[in-house]
Image (cartoon, rainbow, N blue to C red):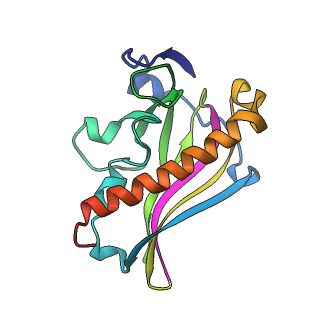
Amino acid sequence: MKLRPSFARPAMTFPEARTLTPNFTNASSLPEKNSSIALGVPGPISQWRTDSLFDYDVFPSSIIRYEAEWKTEGRQMRVGDIILQRAMIPPLIGFGLCLEFAVRISRLIEEDKRLGFAYETLTGHAERGISEFYFEEREGSLYFTIHTHSEPGHWTSRLGKHIATLPYQAWCTRRALNHVKTRFHQSNPAS
């Protein structure tokens, strides 16, 4: 994890991030969280545009700015791709500091009733574990879900775990759910 002024250019590069290893051993032993939001539309998933999710347009830019390897190379997401993340502290555009870290796409979710991806956190990340982001059809309706097996992974995030880290993570999750719902409806104006 690198701490930098929010206006500074990213210091980490894709080649540097590719050398990093996951910062956990067994994700299933980490605390599990599942958060969903109803999108207010019927299934199936295939009738809706979902490309904003695969552009990693999950978090508002006031929380995280990012650079995705597949977008830089002008192609689609694939397993092994790196996302360089810059988390804003406090979450205000253009102010404060940012924490830089990287994640790696570990799985593409392409099932009949679920569509999305998962990533694993890499050495130096403020969290450790796996996060899944997917659209899901349940009982004929469409939802967006964030499913994680994770915990604070850096000594600084473990230090204030109950006072700051976990409440901030819950706040970011709620913002991400609402952001994806908004982007989904912008991409599907007839919804």
Q: Residue at x 54, y 27 (%)?
A: 90
Q: Residue at x 45, y 22 (%)?
A: 16
In this view, which residue lies farthest toward the bottom?
139
Q: Is residue 148 left or right of residue 145?
A: right
The image shows residue 137 at horizontal and vertical percentages of: 46, 77
Count up the numbered dots. Answer: 0
Residue 108 in sight from this viewpoint:
no
The image shows residue 173 at horizontal and vertical percentages of: 56, 49
The image shows residue 36 at horizontal and vertical percentages of: 55, 64
Hey, which quadrant is residue 147 in on the image? Answer: bottom right
Q: Is residue 25 above or below residue 65?
A: below
Q: Is residue 64 left or right of residue 120?
A: left
The image shows residue 142 at horizontal and vertical percentages of: 43, 74
| Quarter that holds the C terminus | bottom left
Magenta-drawn stretch contains 160: no
Q: What residue span does the magenta drawing correspond to?
A: 126-138
Q: Is residue 147 above or below residue 14?
A: below
Q: Main secondary structure of the magenta part?
A: strand
Observer-nearest of 165 and 107: 165
Hey, which quadrant is residue 154 in on the image? Answer: top right
Q: Is residue 91 left or right of residue 34?
A: left
Hey, which quadrant is residue 121 in on the image? Answer: top right
Observer-nearest of 17 and 158: 158
